Structures are given as C-alpha cells and as structure tokens.
Amino acid sequence: MNKGADSTSEVAVQVASPCIRHCCLDDNDVCVGCYRTLNEIMNWQSSSNEQKRVILEACEKRRVR
C-alpha cells in the first residue's frame, strides 16, 4: 500500500468560521452577524476544532434567544 495515499485521512478538516462579514458588536460584545463574543472572535484562529465546535454551539444558543 502506498503510504502517501492514506495521508489525507490523518489530516483533520478545520471547522469553518461562522463569520458572515456582518461584523457589529452589541452592548454585550456579541457579534450580531455570527453571534460570537469578542473573545471567541479573537481566539478563533488559535482554537482547536473541539473548542470551535463548543463556540458554534454557544453561538446557536445565542442566535435562538
């Protein structure tokens, strides 16, 4: 078996940013476009995929309020 043929299965697919380029923070420092907090936005790039999934769950809860 070709060792390089299976290399893509080892690479984790990055969780996509929820940003819709409608960036404006409300009084609670939550973006009205993607529902992330200012801290979540600032830390997105350095967050693990698991952390990003937790952020996305929190965004969804904020969105439905």
Image (spheres, rainbow, N blue to C red):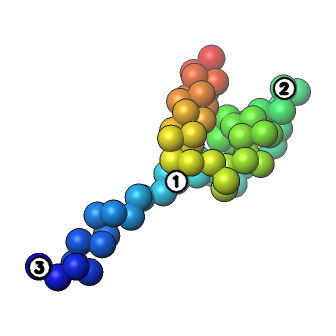
Reading the image, the residue beneath label 1 is 16
Under circle 1, the secondary element is loop
Q: Residue furthest right?
A: 27
Residue 1: image location, x then y, percent: 11, 79
**Image quadrant of residue 51?**
top right
Residue 40: image location, x then y, percent: 72, 40
Residue 65 disc label = none
Few, some or many residues within 10 Å of mark 1 (<14, 14–19, 20+): few
Which residue lies at the image location 29% right of the left edge and 64% below the top edge?
Answer: 9
Q: Earlier in the sequence, mark 3 or mark 1?
A: 3
Which residue lies at the image location 56% right of the left edge and 48% below the top edge?
Answer: 48
Query: Relative to 11, does residue 28 appear above or below in the rendering?
Result: above
Report the amino acid beneath label 2. Answer: Asn
Residue 7: image location, x then y, percent: 30, 72
* Residue 56 visible, this orientation: no
Q: Depth check: 10 or 16 in front?
A: 10
Q: Depth check: 35 or 49 in front?
A: 49
Reading the image, the residue beneath label 2 is 28
Few, some or many residues within 10 Å of mark 3 (<14, 14–19, 20+): few
Reading the image, the residue beneath label 3 is 1
- Position of 28 compared to 45: left or right? right
- Position of 14 compared to 33: left or right? left
Under circle 3, the secondary element is loop
